Amino acid sequence: MIDESRPLRLALVGCGGRGIGVSREFQEHLKLARVTALYDVAAAGIERAKQAFPEATPCKSLEELGRREDVDAAFIATTDDTHVDCALALKPFKKHLLVEKPLAISIADCDRLVNGFAGERETVQMVGLCMRYNNAMQRVHQLVSNGMIGEILCADCIDHVSVGGTYYFHHWMSRRNKVIGLLLQKGCHSLDFISWVIGSKAARVHSFGGLDYYGGDEPAEKVCHECNEFADCSERQERFIQLDYVQKPQRKPDFCAYSREVDVNDNAVVNVLYESGAKLSYTECHFSPDYERKFCFIGTKGQIELSCPHGRAPEIAVSFRLRPGKVMRETVEMDPGGHQGGDPAMLREFVAAINERRKPLTDFAAGREGAVIAISAEESIESGQVVEVTDPDGTPRKVTRRKGRSRELSRTELLDRTPLYAKRAGG
Ligand SMILES: NC(=O)c1ccc[n+]([C@@H]2O[C@H](COP(=O)([O-])OP(=O)(O)OC[C@H]3O[C@@H](n4cnc5c(N)ncnc54)[C@H](O)[C@@H]3O)[C@@H](O)[C@H]2O)c1
């Protein structure tokens, strides 16, 4: 039984900002883990992590780390293109795995991971889709599961990222070979949440996107701190930046955002058709003035809107088709911790899944779903075609379409006067 008296013995694989930040939260705030081993391909990474976790043992290879008996679980927080190889390399050693999002940067790699762990029941395998665990997203899922708006038939979402330049366009996250695209690197959180709420899997994806604001012809080696245009550059980057998911300012690379190496799209619109017949329209923009996510789910009985402005409490509004005067508004109190409480709740779920010997809410199969939409969207931007999504075993997905679904609901039911919070599943 893992608890504060017997914390999880954790190996950190990938000792960058995220790896160290989350491991600290796990060890110092939750006190549910103790970092016992470290691995990073870069000496600087190990050096950083040693400062944070002086008692942890640096390892020279994943194999050496896997063989350690003082390791129960590994947190893989390497760059996106390496998650799958790291996880598979640790598989023979039977460690519980928490892999950062996105699961992988290709569908083939997602499937290699999901299929590779298909028969593995002794350990917990989880993807770090932390947003799903925050109070606002949990609440929306709960309302939908309770039947509040009926069956979801369509949804839309905007993901506006005013900090896109700072967060993505000065380092590896702006390079396609490392991330495929920001729909995956950033958008996988929203896409994961939406698919979870809709309760269906994507069957077809289409997208338009472009690199219209960042990118250019500047040389690859150009950096902000040596640039003579720094004083008047709208996208200049300081050496230390404050990210919203770590507590202290971090020293990050400051490669030019107008470099010819920048090749990910900075805005895109995506359409998704789910197996259930539900449709999604998703827009992501990395040069908006606002930093905000907004979701709207429309069901057979009503709609739920969730607005998540950065730095302020999220708001939920529920309205009903036949009762225009009735609107339920709720401001969601978020918990402390990274990602507005999403990080600690995710870490608690990891420990609970280990203790209860069950699958976590965001297992590898769930991690694949959000990633698949984003990767298919990038493919569609390139080809101009609609991309058909398959299951991990290659089975094509079929879309169910049923007309006249409102006929399944009586007027009496839609005018239901039961207090909102008394409703239960199917009600
Ligand atoms: N959940 C979230 O919202 C969230 C937020 C930030 C980052 N992340 C994810 O966390 C991961 C790390 O992001 P970061 O910002 O810390 O990046 P980073 O560049 O600061 O750190 C990555 C570290 O991984 C190391 N590394 C790369 N390949 C490796 C390999 N094969 N084996 C061992 N070490 C390797 C690098 O040397 C570096 O120290 C990424 O997958 C990113 O998508 C998730």
Image (cartoon, helix red, strand yellow):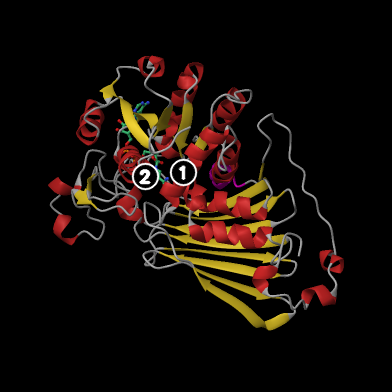
Could you tell me which secondary element the residue under label 2 belongs to? loop
User: Is 221 one of the magenta-colored residues?
Assistant: no
- Residue 403 placed where, x, y %? 85, 61
Using the rendered image of the protein, determine whether residue 215 is visible from the camera's viewpoint. no
> How many numbered marks are there?
2
- Residue 146 placed where, x, y %? 69, 61
Write the residue at 46% across / 52% down: 210
Residue at the disc numbered 1: 348
- Residue 102 placed where, x, y %? 48, 40
Q: Amino acid at mark 1?
A: Arg
Q: In the figure, residue 295 lies in which quadrant?
A: bottom right
The segment highlighted magenta reads 375-384
The yes-or-no answer for disc 1 within 8 Å of ligand 1 is no
Residue at the disc numbered 2: 30
Q: In the figure, residue 36 lies in which quadrant?
A: top left
Assess disc 2: are there few (<14), some (14-19) or many (≥20) residues with their C-alpha within 10 Å of its C-alpha.
some
Using the rendered image of the protein, determine whether residue 27 is visible from the camera's viewpoint. yes
Could you tell me which secondary element the residue under label 1 belongs to? helix
**Marks 2 and 1 close (CB-CB < 8 Å):** yes
* Chain-order first, disc 2 or disc 1: 2
| Nearer to the camera, 63 or 28 | 28
Assess disc 1: are there few (<14), some (14-19) or many (≥20) residues with their C-alpha within 10 Å of its C-alpha.
some
Question: Where ligand 1 lies, by quadrant?
Answer: top left
Extreme front residue here?
5
Q: How far apart are the two marked residues, 2 and 1, measured between alpha carbons?
A: 8 Å
Determine which of the numbered discs, if any, sits on residue 234 in the image.
Answer: none
**Magenta span dominant secondary structure:** helix
Q: Amino acid at mark 2?
A: Leu
Write the residue at 37% across / 44% down: 30
User: Is 377 one of the magenta-colored residues?
Assistant: yes
Q: Is residue 362 left or right of residue 235?
A: right
Q: State whether residue 92 is above or below residue 156.
A: above
